[in-house]
Amino acid sequence: MTSLISRAGARFGALLPARADLTDMRRDPRRDLLAGLTVAIVALPLALGFGVSSGLGAEAGLATAVVAGALAALFGGSNLQVSGPTGAMTVVLVPIVGAYGPTGVLTVGLMAGVMLVALAALRAGKYMQYVPAPVVEGFTLGIACVIGLQQVPSALGVPKPEGDRVLVVTWRAVEEFARHPNWTAVGLAASVAAVMLVGARLRPTVPFSILAVIAATVVAQLAGLDAAEPIGDLPLGLPAPSLGFLELGSLGTLLAPAVAVTALAALESLLSASVADGMTVGQQHDPDRELFGQGLANIAAPLFGGVPATGAIARTAVNVRTGAGSRLAALVHAAILAVIVFAAAPLVSKIPLAALAGVLLATAVRMVEVGSLRAMARATRADALILVLTAIATLALDLVYAVIIGLAVAGVLALRAVARQARFDQVPLDRGDHSVEEHALLAEHIVAYRIDGPLFFAAAHRFLLELTEVADVRVVILRMSRVSTMDATGALVVKDAVEKLTRRGILVLASGVRPGQHQVLDSVGALDLLRPDGMDYATTPEAIRGARDHLERAGVLPAGAARQEQQAVPNPADSPEFHEEPAP
Protein backbone atom coordinates (compact mmCIF):
# COMPACT_ATOMS: atom_id res chain seq x y z
CA MET A 1 0.00 0.00 0.00
CA THR A 2 2.83 2.35 0.89
CA SER A 3 4.60 1.69 -2.39
CA LEU A 4 1.38 2.30 -4.31
CA ILE A 5 0.89 5.67 -2.62
CA SER A 6 4.53 6.50 -3.27
CA ARG A 7 4.20 5.73 -6.98
CA ALA A 8 1.00 7.76 -7.22
CA GLY A 9 2.71 10.68 -5.50
CA ALA A 10 5.69 10.47 -7.82
CA ARG A 11 3.40 10.37 -10.87
CA PHE A 12 1.45 13.40 -9.65
CA GLY A 13 4.65 15.25 -8.77
CA ALA A 14 5.90 14.79 -12.33
CA LEU A 15 2.89 16.78 -13.56
CA LEU A 16 3.61 19.86 -11.43
CA PRO A 17 5.81 22.83 -12.40
CA ALA A 18 9.52 22.23 -11.88
CA ARG A 19 12.43 24.44 -10.88
CA ALA A 20 13.64 24.34 -14.49
CA ASP A 21 10.54 26.28 -15.57
CA LEU A 22 11.50 29.21 -13.33
CA THR A 23 15.08 29.04 -14.57
CA ASP A 24 13.88 29.27 -18.17
CA MET A 25 11.71 32.30 -17.40
CA ARG A 26 14.69 34.13 -15.93
CA ARG A 27 16.90 33.51 -18.95
CA ASP A 28 15.66 36.29 -21.26
CA PRO A 29 12.58 38.00 -19.75
CA ARG A 30 12.71 41.01 -22.09
CA ARG A 31 12.26 38.82 -25.16
CA ASP A 32 9.40 36.93 -23.49
CA LEU A 33 7.69 40.19 -22.48
CA LEU A 34 7.76 41.44 -26.08
CA ALA A 35 6.45 38.10 -27.38
CA GLY A 36 3.65 38.09 -24.79
CA LEU A 37 2.60 41.61 -25.78
CA THR A 38 2.48 40.67 -29.45
CA VAL A 39 0.46 37.52 -28.78
CA ALA A 40 -2.00 39.46 -26.61
CA ILE A 41 -2.61 41.93 -29.44
CA VAL A 42 -3.27 39.04 -31.82
CA ALA A 43 -5.37 37.13 -29.26
CA LEU A 44 -7.71 39.96 -28.28
CA PRO A 45 -9.92 40.01 -31.40
CA LEU A 46 -9.81 36.21 -31.60
CA ALA A 47 -10.92 35.83 -27.99
CA LEU A 48 -13.75 38.29 -28.55
CA GLY A 49 -14.77 36.68 -31.82
CA PHE A 50 -14.75 33.10 -30.60
CA GLY A 51 -16.65 34.13 -27.47
CA VAL A 52 -19.37 35.70 -29.61
CA SER A 53 -19.43 32.73 -32.02
CA SER A 54 -19.78 30.23 -29.19
CA GLY A 55 -23.01 31.89 -28.08
CA LEU A 56 -21.82 32.90 -24.60
CA GLY A 57 -20.68 36.39 -25.57
CA ALA A 58 -17.42 38.29 -25.89
CA GLU A 59 -16.93 38.37 -22.10
CA ALA A 60 -16.77 34.55 -22.06
CA GLY A 61 -14.00 34.58 -24.67
CA LEU A 62 -12.01 37.13 -22.66
CA ALA A 63 -12.45 35.21 -19.41
CA THR A 64 -11.23 32.05 -21.11
CA ALA A 65 -8.19 33.76 -22.59
CA VAL A 66 -7.21 35.23 -19.22
CA VAL A 67 -7.94 32.38 -16.80
CA ALA A 68 -7.28 29.35 -18.99
CA GLY A 69 -4.37 31.08 -20.74
CA ALA A 70 -2.60 31.72 -17.43
CA LEU A 71 -3.19 28.29 -15.87
CA ALA A 72 -2.29 26.34 -19.02
CA ALA A 73 0.90 28.40 -19.36
CA LEU A 74 1.86 27.72 -15.75
CA PHE A 75 0.97 24.03 -15.49
CA GLY A 76 1.12 22.89 -19.13
CA GLY A 77 3.78 20.70 -20.68
CA SER A 78 5.01 23.14 -23.35
CA ASN A 79 7.19 26.18 -22.77
CA LEU A 80 5.75 27.92 -25.83
CA GLN A 81 2.09 26.91 -25.92
CA VAL A 82 -0.56 29.67 -25.82
CA SER A 83 -4.06 28.55 -24.83
CA GLY A 84 -7.49 30.09 -25.02
CA PRO A 85 -10.76 29.87 -26.96
CA THR A 86 -10.30 28.39 -30.42
CA GLY A 87 -12.29 27.98 -33.58
CA ALA A 88 -12.30 24.19 -33.38
CA MET A 89 -13.77 24.27 -29.91
CA THR A 90 -16.36 26.85 -31.00
CA VAL A 91 -17.55 24.42 -33.67
CA VAL A 92 -18.30 21.85 -30.95
CA LEU A 93 -19.80 24.35 -28.49
CA VAL A 94 -22.42 25.90 -30.78
CA PRO A 95 -24.71 22.83 -30.84
CA ILE A 96 -24.17 22.34 -27.08
CA VAL A 97 -25.37 25.90 -26.46
CA GLY A 98 -28.39 25.26 -28.64
CA ALA A 99 -29.29 22.05 -26.82
CA TYR A 100 -28.38 22.81 -23.21
CA GLY A 101 -27.90 26.58 -22.97
CA PRO A 102 -24.95 28.53 -21.50
CA THR A 103 -25.03 26.64 -18.18
CA GLY A 104 -24.68 23.38 -20.11
CA VAL A 105 -21.53 24.67 -21.78
CA LEU A 106 -20.02 25.68 -18.44
CA THR A 107 -20.82 22.27 -16.96
CA VAL A 108 -19.37 20.50 -19.99
CA GLY A 109 -16.17 22.55 -19.66
CA LEU A 110 -15.82 21.61 -16.00
CA MET A 111 -16.39 17.92 -16.72
CA ALA A 112 -13.91 18.02 -19.60
CA GLY A 113 -11.31 19.56 -17.30
CA VAL A 114 -11.69 16.72 -14.81
CA MET A 115 -11.43 14.16 -17.62
CA LEU A 116 -8.25 15.79 -18.95
CA VAL A 117 -6.64 15.60 -15.52
CA ALA A 118 -7.63 11.93 -15.35
CA LEU A 119 -6.06 11.32 -18.78
CA ALA A 120 -2.88 12.98 -17.59
CA ALA A 121 -2.79 10.78 -14.48
CA LEU A 122 -3.25 7.72 -16.72
CA ARG A 123 -0.39 8.90 -18.96
CA ALA A 124 -2.60 8.89 -22.03
CA GLY A 125 -0.79 11.76 -23.76
CA LYS A 126 1.41 9.52 -25.86
CA TYR A 127 -1.56 7.86 -27.53
CA MET A 128 -2.65 11.04 -29.29
CA GLN A 129 0.25 10.64 -31.71
CA TYR A 130 -1.54 7.71 -33.33
CA VAL A 131 -4.19 9.90 -34.96
CA PRO A 132 -3.41 9.69 -38.70
CA ALA A 133 -2.29 12.85 -40.47
CA PRO A 134 -5.12 12.71 -43.08
CA VAL A 135 -7.66 12.78 -40.23
CA VAL A 136 -5.98 15.84 -38.71
CA GLU A 137 -5.78 17.61 -42.08
CA GLY A 138 -9.36 16.67 -42.93
CA PHE A 139 -10.96 17.99 -39.77
CA THR A 140 -8.73 21.09 -39.90
CA LEU A 141 -10.12 21.80 -43.36
CA GLY A 142 -13.66 21.08 -42.17
CA ILE A 143 -13.21 23.31 -39.11
CA ALA A 144 -11.96 26.16 -41.29
CA CYS A 145 -15.08 25.86 -43.46
CA VAL A 146 -17.38 25.75 -40.43
CA ILE A 147 -15.70 28.75 -38.80
CA GLY A 148 -16.05 30.74 -42.01
CA LEU A 149 -19.70 29.80 -42.42
CA GLN A 150 -20.45 30.65 -38.78
CA GLN A 151 -19.37 34.24 -39.46
CA VAL A 152 -21.76 34.74 -42.38
CA PRO A 153 -24.66 36.20 -40.33
CA SER A 154 -22.42 38.77 -38.59
CA ALA A 155 -20.54 39.56 -41.80
CA LEU A 156 -23.86 40.18 -43.58
CA GLY A 157 -25.22 42.20 -40.68
CA VAL A 158 -28.30 40.05 -40.10
CA PRO A 159 -29.57 38.42 -36.87
CA LYS A 160 -28.34 34.89 -36.44
CA PRO A 161 -31.09 32.56 -37.71
CA GLU A 162 -32.35 29.64 -35.67
CA GLY A 163 -30.82 26.25 -36.35
CA ASP A 164 -28.08 23.90 -35.17
CA ARG A 165 -26.61 23.05 -38.60
CA VAL A 166 -24.16 25.57 -39.94
CA LEU A 167 -25.19 25.03 -43.56
CA VAL A 168 -28.85 25.65 -42.72
CA VAL A 169 -28.03 28.74 -40.65
CA THR A 170 -25.84 30.13 -43.41
CA TRP A 171 -28.51 29.64 -46.05
CA ARG A 172 -31.13 31.35 -43.92
CA ALA A 173 -28.75 34.25 -43.25
CA VAL A 174 -28.19 34.71 -46.98
CA GLU A 175 -31.95 34.68 -47.56
CA GLU A 176 -32.42 37.34 -44.85
CA PHE A 177 -29.65 39.46 -46.36
CA ALA A 178 -31.30 39.23 -49.78
CA ARG A 179 -34.50 40.65 -48.26
CA HIS A 180 -32.75 43.31 -46.15
CA PRO A 181 -29.18 43.92 -47.41
CA ASN A 182 -26.67 45.51 -45.00
CA TRP A 183 -23.74 46.62 -47.13
CA THR A 184 -22.10 48.44 -44.23
CA ALA A 185 -21.50 45.20 -42.37
CA VAL A 186 -20.31 43.46 -45.54
CA GLY A 187 -17.85 46.27 -46.23
CA LEU A 188 -16.41 46.20 -42.71
CA ALA A 189 -16.03 42.42 -42.64
CA ALA A 190 -14.49 42.27 -46.11
CA SER A 191 -12.10 45.16 -45.37
CA VAL A 192 -10.83 43.62 -42.13
CA ALA A 193 -10.37 40.20 -43.74
CA ALA A 194 -8.58 41.71 -46.75
CA VAL A 195 -6.22 43.76 -44.58
CA MET A 196 -5.32 40.69 -42.53
CA LEU A 197 -4.74 38.40 -45.51
CA VAL A 198 -2.80 40.89 -47.63
CA GLY A 199 -0.88 42.24 -44.65
CA ALA A 200 0.17 38.76 -43.54
CA ARG A 201 1.80 38.22 -46.92
CA LEU A 202 3.59 41.56 -46.99
CA ARG A 203 4.59 41.90 -43.31
CA PRO A 204 4.01 38.64 -41.42
CA THR A 205 5.31 40.06 -38.13
CA VAL A 206 2.84 42.96 -37.96
CA PRO A 207 -0.41 42.25 -36.02
CA PHE A 208 -2.78 43.42 -38.75
CA SER A 209 -5.79 41.88 -37.01
CA ILE A 210 -5.85 44.37 -34.16
CA LEU A 211 -4.93 47.25 -36.49
CA ALA A 212 -7.80 46.39 -38.83
CA VAL A 213 -10.26 46.05 -35.92
CA ILE A 214 -9.20 49.41 -34.48
CA ALA A 215 -9.54 51.05 -37.87
CA ALA A 216 -13.00 49.54 -38.43
CA THR A 217 -14.13 50.65 -34.97
CA VAL A 218 -12.89 54.22 -35.51
CA VAL A 219 -14.59 54.44 -38.92
CA ALA A 220 -17.86 53.08 -37.51
CA GLN A 221 -17.82 55.60 -34.65
CA LEU A 222 -16.78 58.66 -36.67
CA ALA A 223 -19.14 57.94 -39.55
CA GLY A 224 -22.01 57.06 -37.24
CA LEU A 225 -22.63 53.75 -38.97
CA ASP A 226 -25.72 52.56 -37.15
CA ALA A 227 -25.85 49.45 -39.31
CA ALA A 228 -22.54 48.28 -37.77
CA GLU A 229 -23.83 46.57 -34.62
CA PRO A 230 -21.22 46.69 -31.82
CA ILE A 231 -20.28 43.95 -29.35
CA GLY A 232 -22.21 45.68 -26.57
CA ASP A 233 -21.49 46.32 -22.92
CA LEU A 234 -18.78 44.25 -21.26
CA PRO A 235 -18.32 43.77 -17.51
CA LEU A 236 -15.49 45.74 -15.89
CA GLY A 237 -13.35 42.79 -14.83
CA LEU A 238 -13.85 39.11 -14.31
CA PRO A 239 -16.84 37.84 -12.36
CA ALA A 240 -16.31 36.21 -8.97
CA PRO A 241 -15.72 32.44 -9.29
CA SER A 242 -18.92 30.47 -8.81
CA LEU A 243 -20.32 26.97 -9.19
CA GLY A 244 -23.87 28.29 -9.44
CA PHE A 245 -24.23 26.92 -12.96
CA LEU A 246 -23.63 23.32 -11.86
CA GLU A 247 -26.66 21.02 -11.74
CA LEU A 248 -25.69 17.54 -10.58
CA GLY A 249 -28.79 16.02 -12.15
CA SER A 250 -27.65 17.03 -15.64
CA LEU A 251 -24.20 15.40 -15.45
CA GLY A 252 -25.37 12.16 -17.04
CA THR A 253 -27.03 13.97 -19.92
CA LEU A 254 -23.92 16.05 -20.57
CA LEU A 255 -21.47 13.15 -20.44
CA ALA A 256 -21.33 12.59 -24.21
CA PRO A 257 -20.70 16.30 -25.05
CA ALA A 258 -18.07 16.41 -22.29
CA VAL A 259 -16.25 13.43 -23.79
CA ALA A 260 -16.30 15.17 -27.18
CA VAL A 261 -14.88 18.38 -25.70
CA THR A 262 -12.23 16.39 -23.82
CA ALA A 263 -11.11 14.56 -26.95
CA LEU A 264 -10.92 17.77 -28.94
CA ALA A 265 -9.08 19.67 -26.20
CA ALA A 266 -6.52 16.88 -25.86
CA LEU A 267 -6.01 16.44 -29.58
CA GLU A 268 -5.78 20.11 -30.49
CA SER A 269 -3.56 21.00 -27.53
CA LEU A 270 -1.07 18.21 -28.18
CA LEU A 271 -1.08 18.95 -31.90
CA SER A 272 -0.38 22.63 -31.20
CA ALA A 273 2.43 21.72 -28.78
CA SER A 274 3.97 19.45 -31.43
CA VAL A 275 3.83 22.28 -33.95
CA ALA A 276 5.65 24.52 -31.48
CA ASP A 277 8.34 21.87 -30.98
CA GLY A 278 8.82 21.62 -34.73
CA MET A 279 9.27 25.39 -35.09
CA THR A 280 12.13 25.52 -32.57
CA VAL A 281 15.35 23.75 -31.69
CA GLY A 282 15.73 22.10 -28.31
CA GLN A 283 12.08 22.31 -27.22
CA GLN A 284 10.12 19.16 -26.39
CA HIS A 285 6.74 19.19 -24.70
CA ASP A 286 5.57 16.72 -22.08
CA PRO A 287 2.19 15.38 -23.38
CA ASP A 288 0.91 14.18 -20.00
CA ARG A 289 1.78 17.44 -18.28
CA GLU A 290 0.14 19.32 -21.16
CA LEU A 291 -3.08 17.40 -20.58
CA PHE A 292 -2.81 18.18 -16.87
CA GLY A 293 -2.40 21.89 -17.53
CA GLN A 294 -5.29 21.97 -19.96
CA GLY A 295 -7.39 20.07 -17.45
CA LEU A 296 -6.76 22.62 -14.69
CA ALA A 297 -7.42 25.45 -17.16
CA ASN A 298 -10.78 23.96 -18.15
CA ILE A 299 -11.76 23.33 -14.54
CA ALA A 300 -11.10 26.98 -13.65
CA ALA A 301 -12.43 28.74 -16.78
CA PRO A 302 -16.14 27.83 -16.25
CA LEU A 303 -15.98 29.18 -12.70
CA PHE A 304 -15.41 32.64 -14.25
CA GLY A 305 -17.96 32.16 -17.03
CA GLY A 306 -15.42 31.03 -19.64
CA VAL A 307 -15.82 28.48 -22.41
CA PRO A 308 -13.64 25.35 -22.76
CA ALA A 309 -10.09 26.12 -23.90
CA THR A 310 -7.37 24.36 -25.86
CA GLY A 311 -3.91 25.08 -27.10
CA ALA A 312 -4.21 27.59 -29.97
CA ILE A 313 -2.02 26.81 -32.96
CA ALA A 314 -2.19 30.30 -34.50
CA ARG A 315 -1.35 32.13 -31.26
CA THR A 316 1.35 29.58 -30.40
CA ALA A 317 2.95 30.09 -33.81
CA VAL A 318 2.95 33.86 -33.28
CA ASN A 319 4.53 33.31 -29.87
CA VAL A 320 7.33 31.22 -31.36
CA ARG A 321 7.94 33.54 -34.32
CA THR A 322 8.27 36.59 -32.06
CA GLY A 323 11.07 34.97 -30.08
CA ALA A 324 9.44 33.49 -26.98
CA GLY A 325 11.77 31.22 -25.04
CA SER A 326 9.76 30.24 -21.98
CA ARG A 327 6.25 30.05 -20.57
CA LEU A 328 6.64 33.63 -19.30
CA ALA A 329 5.45 34.88 -22.71
CA ALA A 330 2.11 33.06 -22.43
CA LEU A 331 1.69 34.31 -18.86
CA VAL A 332 2.33 37.89 -20.02
CA HIS A 333 -0.24 37.43 -22.81
CA ALA A 334 -2.88 36.45 -20.22
CA ALA A 335 -1.89 39.34 -17.91
CA ILE A 336 -2.20 41.93 -20.69
CA LEU A 337 -5.62 40.63 -21.64
CA ALA A 338 -6.63 40.88 -17.97
CA VAL A 339 -5.56 44.53 -17.92
CA ILE A 340 -7.63 45.15 -21.06
CA VAL A 341 -10.65 43.51 -19.40
CA PHE A 342 -10.34 45.76 -16.35
CA ALA A 343 -9.25 49.01 -18.00
CA ALA A 344 -10.55 49.10 -21.57
CA ALA A 345 -13.88 47.28 -21.51
CA PRO A 346 -15.85 50.40 -22.60
CA LEU A 347 -13.64 50.81 -25.67
CA VAL A 348 -13.71 47.12 -26.54
CA SER A 349 -17.51 47.11 -26.33
CA LYS A 350 -17.68 49.46 -29.35
CA ILE A 351 -15.98 47.03 -31.76
CA PRO A 352 -18.42 46.13 -34.57
CA LEU A 353 -19.45 42.49 -34.75
CA ALA A 354 -18.83 42.61 -38.50
CA ALA A 355 -15.18 43.50 -37.84
CA LEU A 356 -14.77 40.46 -35.60
CA ALA A 357 -16.45 38.37 -38.28
CA GLY A 358 -13.83 39.63 -40.73
CA VAL A 359 -11.05 38.56 -38.32
CA LEU A 360 -12.45 35.06 -38.05
CA LEU A 361 -13.04 34.79 -41.80
CA ALA A 362 -9.39 35.61 -42.40
CA THR A 363 -8.39 33.17 -39.65
CA ALA A 364 -10.41 30.42 -41.33
CA VAL A 365 -8.71 31.09 -44.66
CA ARG A 366 -5.28 31.00 -43.05
CA MET A 367 -6.04 27.70 -41.34
CA VAL A 368 -6.12 25.96 -44.72
CA GLU A 369 -2.60 24.86 -45.69
CA VAL A 370 -3.01 24.31 -49.42
CA GLY A 371 0.42 22.73 -49.75
CA SER A 372 -0.28 20.17 -47.02
CA LEU A 373 -3.67 19.32 -48.48
CA ARG A 374 -2.19 18.88 -51.95
CA ALA A 375 0.60 16.66 -50.63
CA MET A 376 -1.83 14.54 -48.62
CA ALA A 377 -4.18 14.15 -51.59
CA ARG A 378 -1.30 13.06 -53.82
CA ALA A 379 0.20 10.62 -51.31
CA THR A 380 -2.21 7.70 -51.74
CA ARG A 381 -5.84 7.29 -52.68
CA ALA A 382 -6.52 6.04 -49.16
CA ASP A 383 -5.09 9.22 -47.61
CA ALA A 384 -7.10 11.38 -49.98
CA LEU A 385 -10.29 9.44 -49.18
CA ILE A 386 -9.76 9.80 -45.42
CA LEU A 387 -9.10 13.52 -45.76
CA VAL A 388 -12.19 14.18 -47.88
CA LEU A 389 -14.53 12.07 -45.75
CA THR A 390 -13.32 13.69 -42.52
CA ALA A 391 -13.74 17.19 -43.96
CA ILE A 392 -17.24 16.46 -45.29
CA ALA A 393 -18.29 14.85 -42.00
CA THR A 394 -17.02 17.88 -40.08
CA LEU A 395 -19.07 20.18 -42.28
CA ALA A 396 -22.22 18.07 -42.53
CA LEU A 397 -22.30 16.43 -39.09
CA ASP A 398 -19.97 17.60 -36.33
CA LEU A 399 -16.34 17.33 -35.31
CA VAL A 400 -16.75 14.33 -33.03
CA TYR A 401 -18.46 12.23 -35.68
CA ALA A 402 -15.88 13.46 -38.18
CA VAL A 403 -12.97 12.22 -36.10
CA ILE A 404 -14.71 8.91 -35.42
CA ILE A 405 -15.47 8.43 -39.11
CA GLY A 406 -11.95 9.43 -40.10
CA LEU A 407 -10.37 7.04 -37.58
CA ALA A 408 -12.73 4.22 -38.57
CA VAL A 409 -12.01 4.60 -42.30
CA ALA A 410 -8.28 4.91 -41.62
CA GLY A 411 -8.41 1.76 -39.49
CA VAL A 412 -10.29 -0.23 -42.12
CA LEU A 413 -7.92 0.86 -44.89
CA ALA A 414 -4.90 0.11 -42.72
CA LEU A 415 -6.22 -3.39 -41.97
CA ARG A 416 -6.88 -3.88 -45.66
CA ALA A 417 -3.31 -2.90 -46.49
CA VAL A 418 -1.89 -5.20 -43.81
CA ALA A 419 -4.12 -8.07 -44.90
CA ARG A 420 -2.84 -7.73 -48.45
CA GLN A 421 0.68 -8.38 -47.18
CA ALA A 422 -0.32 -11.92 -46.20
CA ARG A 423 0.87 -14.50 -48.76
CA PHE A 424 0.03 -18.14 -49.12
CA ASP A 425 2.29 -19.86 -51.65
CA GLN A 426 3.21 -23.37 -52.64
CA VAL A 427 6.97 -23.49 -52.17
CA PRO A 428 9.64 -25.87 -53.52
CA LEU A 429 11.22 -28.24 -51.04
CA ASP A 430 14.38 -29.02 -53.00
CA ARG A 431 17.79 -28.78 -51.43
CA GLY A 432 19.54 -27.10 -54.28
CA ASP A 433 19.67 -30.20 -56.53
CA HIS A 434 17.63 -28.79 -59.42
CA SER A 435 14.22 -29.74 -58.03
CA VAL A 436 14.89 -33.49 -58.04
CA GLU A 437 13.64 -33.74 -54.48
CA GLU A 438 10.64 -31.60 -55.28
CA HIS A 439 9.64 -33.88 -58.12
CA ALA A 440 10.02 -36.86 -55.81
CA LEU A 441 7.81 -35.26 -53.19
CA LEU A 442 5.14 -34.43 -55.75
CA ALA A 443 5.23 -38.04 -56.91
CA GLU A 444 4.65 -39.03 -53.32
CA HIS A 445 1.72 -36.60 -53.15
CA ILE A 446 3.38 -34.34 -50.56
CA VAL A 447 3.03 -30.58 -50.99
CA ALA A 448 4.13 -27.66 -48.82
CA TYR A 449 2.66 -24.19 -48.44
CA ARG A 450 4.42 -21.30 -46.76
CA ILE A 451 2.35 -18.63 -45.02
CA ASP A 452 3.98 -15.19 -44.97
CA GLY A 453 2.80 -12.20 -42.96
CA PRO A 454 -0.21 -11.78 -40.69
CA LEU A 455 -2.93 -14.39 -40.35
CA PHE A 456 -5.79 -12.54 -38.70
CA PHE A 457 -9.46 -11.82 -39.30
CA ALA A 458 -8.88 -9.53 -42.29
CA ALA A 459 -6.63 -11.99 -44.14
CA ALA A 460 -7.76 -15.42 -43.01
CA HIS A 461 -10.68 -16.02 -45.38
CA ARG A 462 -8.48 -16.03 -48.50
CA PHE A 463 -6.17 -18.52 -46.82
CA LEU A 464 -9.08 -20.88 -46.16
CA LEU A 465 -10.30 -20.74 -49.75
CA GLU A 466 -6.87 -21.42 -51.24
CA LEU A 467 -5.89 -24.17 -48.85
CA THR A 468 -9.08 -26.20 -49.11
CA GLU A 469 -8.80 -26.23 -52.93
CA VAL A 470 -5.62 -28.35 -53.00
CA ALA A 471 -6.12 -31.62 -54.85
CA ASP A 472 -4.34 -34.88 -55.64
CA VAL A 473 -2.17 -34.85 -52.51
CA ARG A 474 -1.90 -37.09 -49.46
CA VAL A 475 0.03 -34.75 -47.12
CA VAL A 476 0.05 -30.98 -46.80
CA ILE A 477 2.86 -29.33 -44.86
CA LEU A 478 2.20 -25.80 -43.58
CA ARG A 479 5.41 -23.84 -43.12
CA MET A 480 4.38 -21.32 -40.46
CA SER A 481 7.64 -19.78 -39.28
CA ARG A 482 6.95 -16.58 -41.25
CA VAL A 483 3.52 -15.94 -39.77
CA SER A 484 4.11 -12.56 -38.14
CA THR A 485 0.89 -12.46 -36.12
CA MET A 486 -2.17 -14.61 -35.59
CA ASP A 487 -5.46 -13.93 -33.84
CA ALA A 488 -8.31 -16.21 -32.84
CA THR A 489 -10.01 -15.80 -36.22
CA GLY A 490 -6.86 -16.85 -38.03
CA ALA A 491 -6.46 -19.86 -35.75
CA LEU A 492 -10.10 -20.87 -36.28
CA VAL A 493 -9.64 -20.66 -40.05
CA VAL A 494 -6.58 -22.89 -39.79
CA LYS A 495 -8.60 -25.36 -37.73
CA ASP A 496 -11.47 -25.29 -40.24
CA ALA A 497 -9.11 -25.84 -43.18
CA VAL A 498 -7.35 -28.73 -41.45
CA GLU A 499 -10.65 -30.40 -40.58
CA LYS A 500 -11.88 -30.11 -44.18
CA LEU A 501 -8.64 -31.57 -45.55
CA THR A 502 -8.69 -34.34 -42.95
CA ARG A 503 -12.21 -35.33 -44.01
CA ARG A 504 -10.83 -35.73 -47.53
CA GLY A 505 -8.15 -38.10 -46.23
CA ILE A 506 -5.35 -35.52 -46.42
CA LEU A 507 -2.88 -35.35 -43.54
CA VAL A 508 -1.88 -31.84 -42.46
CA LEU A 509 1.43 -31.22 -40.67
CA ALA A 510 2.91 -27.93 -39.54
CA SER A 511 6.50 -26.85 -39.19
CA GLY A 512 8.07 -23.85 -37.54
CA VAL A 513 5.09 -22.83 -35.39
CA ARG A 514 6.40 -19.95 -33.31
CA PRO A 515 6.14 -20.18 -29.51
CA GLY A 516 3.86 -17.16 -29.26
CA GLN A 517 1.34 -18.78 -31.61
CA HIS A 518 1.01 -22.09 -29.75
CA GLN A 519 -1.40 -20.54 -27.26
CA VAL A 520 -3.82 -19.08 -29.79
CA LEU A 521 -3.84 -22.30 -31.84
CA ASP A 522 -4.35 -24.38 -28.71
CA SER A 523 -7.14 -22.14 -27.42
CA VAL A 524 -9.35 -22.96 -30.42
CA GLY A 525 -8.36 -26.63 -30.63
CA ALA A 526 -6.23 -26.32 -33.78
CA LEU A 527 -2.85 -27.25 -32.29
CA ASP A 528 -3.61 -30.96 -31.80
CA LEU A 529 -4.91 -31.21 -35.35
CA LEU A 530 -1.57 -29.94 -36.68
CA ARG A 531 0.40 -32.66 -34.84
CA PRO A 532 -1.65 -35.83 -35.33
CA ASP A 533 1.33 -37.99 -34.36
CA GLY A 534 1.91 -35.96 -31.21
CA MET A 535 5.05 -34.28 -32.53
CA ASP A 536 6.01 -30.68 -33.16
CA TYR A 537 8.13 -30.20 -36.26
CA ALA A 538 10.60 -27.38 -35.88
CA THR A 539 11.88 -27.61 -39.47
CA THR A 540 10.58 -28.69 -42.84
CA PRO A 541 12.91 -31.76 -43.17
CA GLU A 542 11.47 -33.15 -39.95
CA ALA A 543 7.95 -32.61 -41.28
CA ILE A 544 8.86 -34.37 -44.56
CA ARG A 545 10.17 -37.39 -42.66
CA GLY A 546 6.98 -37.41 -40.60
CA ALA A 547 4.92 -37.29 -43.80
CA ARG A 548 6.83 -40.21 -45.33
CA ASP A 549 6.49 -42.26 -42.16
CA HIS A 550 2.74 -41.70 -42.36
CA LEU A 551 2.62 -42.69 -46.03
CA GLU A 552 4.65 -45.87 -45.28
CA ARG A 553 2.19 -46.85 -42.57
CA ALA A 554 -0.65 -46.17 -45.00
CA GLY A 555 0.99 -48.36 -47.63
CA VAL A 556 1.39 -45.51 -50.11
CA LEU A 557 5.19 -45.70 -49.95
CA PRO A 558 7.24 -48.90 -49.72
CA ALA A 559 8.55 -49.75 -46.28
CA GLY A 560 11.91 -48.14 -45.53
CA ALA A 561 11.49 -45.29 -48.03
CA ALA A 562 11.82 -42.69 -45.32
CA ARG A 563 15.01 -44.35 -44.01
CA GLN A 564 16.45 -44.66 -47.52
CA GLU A 565 15.73 -40.99 -48.18
CA GLN A 566 17.43 -40.05 -44.92
CA GLN A 567 20.54 -42.13 -45.85
CA ALA A 568 20.66 -40.66 -49.37
CA VAL A 569 21.06 -37.22 -47.94
CA PRO A 570 23.57 -37.30 -45.06
CA ASN A 571 21.98 -34.56 -43.01
CA PRO A 572 19.04 -32.69 -44.51
CA ALA A 573 19.02 -30.30 -41.58
CA ASP A 574 22.32 -28.94 -42.82
CA SER A 575 20.61 -27.57 -45.93
CA PRO A 576 19.69 -23.93 -45.30
CA GLU A 577 16.80 -24.13 -47.76
CA PHE A 578 15.03 -26.45 -45.35
CA HIS A 579 15.40 -24.35 -42.23
CA GLU A 580 12.41 -22.33 -41.20
CA GLU A 581 13.08 -18.63 -41.71
CA PRO A 582 11.57 -16.25 -39.17
CA ALA A 583 9.14 -13.62 -40.33
CA PRO A 584 10.87 -10.35 -41.17
Image: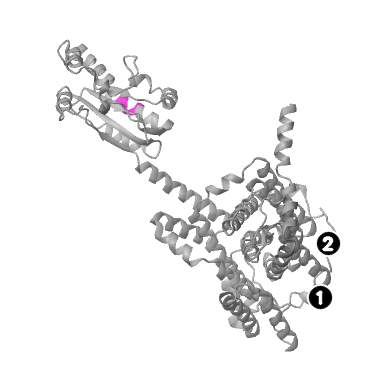
Look at the numbered disc 2 and give the secondary structure of its residue.
Answer: loop
Horizontal side of 505 relative to 357 (left or right) equals left
Determine crowd level at label 1: few under 14, some 14-19, many 20+ residues with C-alpha closer than 10 A.
some
Residue that carries the numbered disc 1 in the rendered image: 346
Residue 122 drawn at (x, y percent): 65, 40
The quadrant holding residue 176 is bottom right
Q: Farthest residue toward the front? A: 27
The quadrant holding residue 540 is top left
Mark closer to the chain start, 1 or 2:
2
Q: Residue at x 71, y 47 (%)?
A: 114
Type of amino acid at the residue the image marks with label 2? Pro
Horizontal side of 253 relative to 233 (left or right) equals left
On screen, residue 227 above or below 439: below
As for residue 496 lying within the magenta part, the answer is yes
Horizontal side of 276 relative to 214 (left or right) equals left
As for residue 562 lying within the magenta part, the answer is no
Q: How is the image coloured?
A: one colour
Q: Quadrant of the C terminus?
A: top left
Q: Kindly report the secondary structure that dominates the magenta region of the rendered protein.
A: helix
Residue that carries the numbered disc 2 in the rendered image: 239
Q: Residue at x 48, y 56 (%)?
A: 134
Q: Which residues are magenta?
A: 495-500
Residue 228 visible, this orientation: no
On screen, residue 267 above or below 430: below
